[in-house]
Image (cartoon, grey):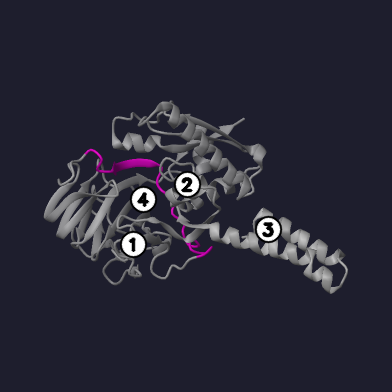
Amino acid sequence: MATDSFRRGLSALVLIAICAPDDAAAQGGVLGRVKRRVEDNVGRQAERMVDCAMGDQTCIDKARAEGKPVKIDSTRTAPGPGGDVVTTGGGGGGGGSDVWANYDFVPGSRTIFVEDFKNDQIGNFPRRYEFQTGNIELVTFRERPWLRVTSTGRFAVPLPAVLPARYTIEMDYWGTGGECWMYTDGTTDGDTHFLFDAAGGGGIGRPGGGASTRGDGGQNLTHQLRILVDGSYAKVFVDARRVANVPNFAIQNGNRVGFYCDGGLALGGIRVAESGRKLYDALTADGRVATQGIYFDTGSDRIRPESAPTLKEIAAMIAEHRGLRVGIEGHTDDVGVAAANLDLSKRRADAVKAYLVGTLRVDVSRVEASGLGSTKPAQPNTTAEGRQTNRRVELVKLP
């Protein structure tokens, strides 16, 4: 990508090339010196350029602190627990601008269950899960707890109620090998299930045939698993890929999420949420609507690429309803310093507005941004579910 200094130098080069006498002295004099300066400048910029994986905020911040230009590689994401760089899209997903082409996951807005293991003792089995068989314990990688299966085992995540007709499940995982089957019918066994493997593959299994996509050997790397169920319709996403799209899945919902996993897999915390009404329906009925579908890097206002479906939905809503004006409110939980949370929530709201206006071409006069930090909790911050719900972006109908 050309820098400003490069463009200025190039403009000077073109001007001199047009105006200078067409003789050997001019070609070897001023023109030659300008050309060499431009070439030297481009070379110095290329030498200083830092190539950072998408989402690797440590790399980005370090480069900027050193005054170096940054090139974001959208085909990679931040390092996983093993220290390797994760390739977005996984097996066959490819890189470049089309890597998120089929990604249309929008998370549920009402949190049903969430667990991040932060209140559990490393080396133990998590207190809120149900152990059945195998050797399964919490371990730490990169200052984050993971539930690692060291020998084939079964366990379940109990829910406060039977899963609704429309829900989503989000979870990170990594592993040195193996596969895991996930059941949402209340069991940890059977022919109808979701599945994912350490290589970044995943899909749906059921009698008579399911749908799945193989991984590309991305073992020991962090992967993001996301599942969307809408009645009998089910979709599975691993990283940037939609790996399964089944319109007649029709699994019977239960009051727990069961797992049957091979040894070698490690699972991060899980979020289960109910999918609600369309944004505009909720906004007109209640005057405001919360979304959990806008993701940011930890402690940052950088919007992650998986936020695109929700942001596009917001932009489409505003475009469709010409008289609609929307306030964008950033909210946090009460963990940390209140002033820092307030500042972060404002920067995140500003980032959402900037994306809507700059990338999705929303009229700037139809959106306003504000940050409220932890001052307006939607639920008490005393539970993991409450804190998760409070970390949100809310849309407010403006007069």
Residue sitting at 43 percent across and 46 percent down? 297
Cβ atoms at labels 1 and 2 below 8 Å apart: no
What amino acid does circle 2 point to? Asp
What amino acid does circle 3 point to? Phe
Give coordinates of residue 218: x percent, y percent.
33, 66
Vertical arrangement, residue 251 with respect to residue 323, above or below = below
Cβ atoms at labels 4 and 1 below 8 Å apart: no
Residue sitting at 67 percent across and 53 percent down? 4
The reply to whether residue 186 is visible in this rendering is: no
The rendered magenta stretch, by its main secondary structure, is classed as: loop
Q: Give the CA separation, mark 4 to mark 1.
A: 14 Å
Magenta-drawn stretch contains 115: yes
Q: Earlier in the sequence, mark 4 or mark 1?
A: 4
Give the residue number, with chain letter if any, for mark 3: 6
Give the residue number, with chain letter if any, for mark 1: 249
Q: Secondary structure at mark 4?
A: strand
Range of the magenta residues? Answer: 96-119
Q: Give the CA separation, mark 3 to mark 4.
A: 48 Å
Q: Quadrant of the N terminus?
A: bottom right
Give the residue number, with chain letter if any, for mark 4: 168
Give coordinates of residue 321: x percent, y percent.
62, 43
Vertical arrangement, residue 192 with respect to residue 320, above or below = below
Give the residue number, with chain letter if any, for mark 2: 61
Residue most extreme to the bottom: 24
Q: Earlier in the sequence, mark 2 or mark 3?
A: 3
Q: Secondary structure at mark 3?
A: helix
Q: Earlier in the sequence, mark 2 or mark 4?
A: 2
What amino acid does circle 4 point to? Thr
Q: Give the CA separation, mark 2 to mark 3.
A: 24 Å
Q: Earlier in the sequence, mark 1 or mark 2?
A: 2
Closer to us: mark 3 or mark 4?
Answer: 3
Q: Earlier in the sequence, mark 3 or mark 1?
A: 3
